[in-house]
Structures are given as C-alpha cells and as structure tokens.
Amino acid sequence: MVEAEVIVIGAGMAGASAAAEMASSAKVLVLEQEDRPGRHATGRSAALYSEIYGNEVIRTLTRASRPALQDQDGRFARARGCFHIASASQIARLEAFAALPDVGRASRWLSGAEARLEAPVLREGYVAAAVAELNAYDLDVDALHQHYLRRLTAAGGEVRCDAPVVRAERIGGGWRVLAGGEEFHARIVVNAAGAWGDVVARAAGVDPVGLQPKRRPTGPCDAAPEEIDIAIAIDRVQAAADLPVRRVLSSWAGLRTFTPDRTPAVGFDPAAEGFFWLVGQGGYGIQTAPAMARLAAALALDRGLPADLADMGFDARSVAPGRFSGRAAS
C-alpha cells in the first residue's frame, strides 16, 4: 500500500495547482486516469483571462489570480484586447452586463464606430456597441500547468498516470483508494476529476453534486467537434467580422463542467469525512487556478482563508459543496 497524507484525483490544472500548493506542508500523491496530465479540459482551453467573465464568485477568484499569472515576466500572461460585442437587437443585454459593478470597473463602453476604430475588422452593419475589457490576457496554459507540476514534484509530491480510480472507501481515519491496479491510503482525498467528478464520487460512495459537462447535456467523454458546431461558429464570425473563412485547418472541443448553480464546489463533503471537492470550474478553471488552488489548500489543510481573498470579501460558504442536493452547508 502506498501512503500519503493527501491523494488528489485528477492531474489537470485544478488538481496539479492544488496539489502543488498542498505539497509544501503535506505528502501529496496525484492519480491521473490518462497517460499524461492535462489531456482533457486543461489541454483544450480557450486560454483567455477575463475579469468580467462569470458570476461574482468567479470574478473575485479571477482577480485574486492575476498577481500569480503576471509574476513570471510575461511567461504565463500577455495583454490582449477583448471586446464583448452586440448587434442593435442585443444592446439592452450588453447595457445590463456593463451595469454590473465588477464589469463597469474593469471595462469601458464603446459605440459601434469607436469599436470599429480600434478593431477595423468588425462589420459596420453588425456591431452596434461593445464593452472593451481593461484587463484581458492571453494565457499560456501549458506553461502554467507545467509550472505547477514542477512545483509539486520539487516539493516531494508524485503524479501517477494510467491510474483510473476503481473504488475508494473510508477506513479508520482515512481513505483507501484502488487505482491503476494499486492500493493507496491517505487521510484526505481531493476530487479534482473535472467532468468525471461525480463518477469518482460514486466510486467512493459519496453523493454526487450534479455536475453538468457541457457542450450540450452529455456524460463525461473525450469530446470532439461536430461539423454543425464548426459551421455555426464560422457563420457567426463572418456575420460580425470581415474575416472570410475558406477552410478550417484545425478544430477541437472540450467539456466545460458546471455545478447546478455554475459556481465551483470547493470544500469537504459534509457527509463523507476527509472527502474534498474541487470541481465545477466551468469555463473559468485556468484563469481562476492560482487563487482556487490556494483556497483549496487552505480549506483542506485548515490554514484559514487566504488573506487576499478575505480582503476581497470572499466567503468560503459560496463554494461549499454542501449547498447541493439539500445538504447542510459545510
């Protein structure tokens, strides 16, 4: 039996970053079902940092992640303009979006003409207004992911690939996990399995939180693009911008996995001692990874809420998994 203090299930961005944050003060083992880390949602990210994307909880975690993303001499994040555009029929929705306090502080309103001055590719007959982000960045997802994996191993942590979890059970004061033909034991199990989070929970005898892997309602799978989706994307791009698309050189699809309220679940399960949820990052998992990893490590190892999140008014109850399925908040 392989012993650790913390077993993290999933070596994508969520699992790798949380494991790296925990490894400084705990023996951490990461179990990955695939032959390499980051094969699914992490490897198929849109790679955009947007401070006005998502709900209030997401926007707070995103802002708290920016210092870490900017702390590597431009290696992780590079400034990139980002417009949220509206046709004439969509202006009311864009105005409501721009009126949100978090959005208003981090953006500026542009008329259609102003938007076209900054981005001449936009079509005059389509774009009536735009919201321009003040803090948008291209992210190097692989560089960030590898950074966390290196931090993990440098601190003595380990990643085991080709190790899908078959079963996990509570034994004594810890968990016994069967994965990849081996047996592992730890005091804490962190479920960072992405679209497979509820599958892992069931394997551990824990009630699922109701994860919803999206492109469309579907179970967790190795997602692939469909021809109709590609055609719709091309049509929408060409309607809004003077960008003729003659052929598609490459395409990919990934599953953005949400909880029922579209806010991540981060914390211990209220009915399964030592079982820690870190799932439901939706389309925000990369841009929130630094802050969410620190939050997960703090909650799992009883370190107290990170000071920067506390200063932002973040409430850990907003991400507590006990809010689902009629459970009491944890």
Image: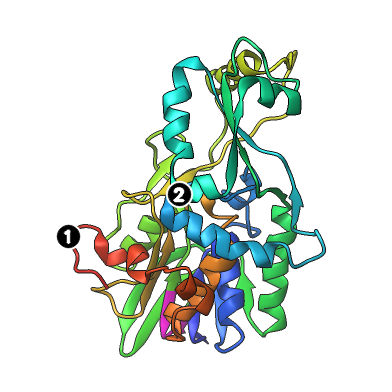
Q: Residue furthest right?
A: 73
Left or right: where does residue 16 sit relative to residue 190?
right
Q: Which residue is mark 1?
A: 326
Residue 174 drawn above or below residue 160: below
Tell me what residue is drawn at x 42 percent, y 78 percent.
Answer: 299
Q: Position of residue 305 (x, y in %)?
A: 45, 79
Tell me what residue is drawn at x 42 percent, y 58 percent.
Answer: 57
Closer to viewer: mark 2 or mark 1: 2
Residue 35 drawn above or below residue 271: above
Magenta segment: 184-189
Q: Secondary structure at mark 1?
A: loop
Q: Residue furthest top?
A: 125
The answer to if 236 sits in the magenta stretch is no
The answer to if 188 sits in the magenta stretch is yes
Q: Position of residue 188 (x, y in %)?
A: 42, 81
Q: Residues within 10 Å of mark 2 (few under 14, many from 20)?
A: few
- Magenta span: chief secondary structure: strand
Q: Nearer the viewer, residue 171 or 196?
A: 196
Asked if one can make out residue 180 in the rendered structure from this viewpoint, the answer is no
Q: Position of residue 204 (x, y in %)?
A: 33, 68
- Numbered marks: total: 2
Residue 205 drawn above or below residue 118: below
Q: Secondary structure at mark 2?
A: helix
Amino acid type at mark 2: Pro
The numbered disc on residue 101 is 2
Q: Position of residue 8 (x, y in %)?
A: 50, 72
